[in-house]
Image (cartoon, rainbow, N blue to C red):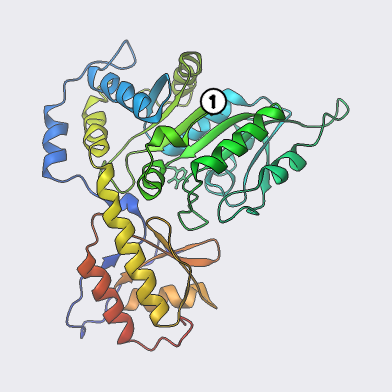
Amino acid sequence: MWCDRVVTFDSTAPDQRPLDFRSDTLTRPDEHMRSALARAEVGDNVIDIDPTIRRLEERAAETLGMPAALWTPSGTMANLIALSTHLRRGDRFLAPRGAHVLVNELGSAAWLAGGMPDPLEHDAGPGRPTPQTLRAAVGGDGPYYTLRTTLLSLENTHNAAGGAVIPPDEHAQLVAAARETGLRVHLDGARIWNASVALGVPPAALTVGVDSVSACFSKGLGAPVGSVVAGSEEFVEQARRMRQMLGGGVRQGGVLAAACLVALDRVDDLVADHAKAARLAAGLRERSWDVTEPQTNIVLAGVPDVETTLEKLRALGILALPMAGKVRFVLHRDVSEADVTEALRRIDTSPFDKTGN
Ligand SMILES: *Cc1c(COP(=O)(O)O)cnc(C)c1O
């Protein structure tokens, strides 16, 4: 497994710094964030409230355009809470193929939340189905022994589709189609901040009509821990019970929420990550790699053999991960523009052929 491997570098290379493009989750809290953590006002968020968590939840709800929000330790837990609240056993839910809830959460949507997952093809563009595809997938009510399709789970940006955004108009059409067919809508907005910055609209413009939305502070913004799941007051009341069932009640969590508040101040900085992604993609394309234009901070490279390419990159001190049968580079605040230039320089020194192999 890639995660077990020891990373070794060519000791003759003039610059051996590891260039780590594996994920934007690598972003670390800086001094400013650490001092905010240290100073955070705290309480017991299980007995009653932690004031800093409360502040974050209120601010996140407002930013996301939802009535209420709940802090969670991770985005995975936020999604699981939402799906568990929306789904009952015997239900079926739809999500764009490759969605995090389908492939990266160990099937918990099925075995814990109790919904049968079904993927939707990306026929409207990367990461998104057309409303027609959605309607066709819902079908009608069958006999008592058939699944009931009750939920659409969207993802903006869509990670495995290369950080692809769903623009507000398409989002609205999908939500309208879901409503017409009687579905609830959850939005996995782990990187909704990136979508908002890339599209030049507030995050709330991307959540219109949804029943719930999750969002991460631990990706690209430097927070060590923390996500939220937002929805109506009643939804959040249920979500709080579910978080407790999952063991996600954290007592003096204000020290963590303080980092999330600092992260929220930094959303606009993500524009720099998108610029670095565009630069890396352009550089790889100049070297004849098969790379599509990134919409946000994720660059996917199609190569003949992913493991071979990852291995060669590793030998150059360039770290990336496999994603959806491709090589994924994620740009984030802890890699600089100079690091992108250096990565391309190292690639030029190595025996890559024109296809990245
Ligand atoms: C990372 C991610 C999550 C889960 O977040 P964690 O905090 O790592 O559990 C959910 N959805 C998407 C699309 C993600 O990229």
Write down the residue under mark 1: 211
Disc 1 is placed on an element classified as loop
Compared to residue 149, the image places residue 239 above or below, namely above
Residue at 43%, 38% in the rendered image? 75
Of residue 356 and residue 308, the one placed in the foreground of this image is 356
- 304 vs 300, left or right, is right
The image shows residue 318 at horizontal and vertical percentages of 32, 71
In this view, the residue farthest toward the right is: 143
Residue at 25%, 39% in the rendered image? 263
The image shows residue 112 at horizontal and vertical percentages of 59, 31
Compared to residue 29, the image places residue 72 above or below, namely above
Marker count (numbered): 1
Write down which quadrant ligand 1 falls in. top left
In the rendered image, is residue 215 in sight? Answer: yes
- 67 vs 348, left or right, is right
Residue at 63%, 26% in the rendered image? 87
Of residue 302 and residue 124, the one placed in the foreground of this image is 124
The image shows residue 251 at horizontal and vertical percentages of 29, 21
Q: Residues within 10 Å of mark 1 (few under 14, many from 20)?
A: some
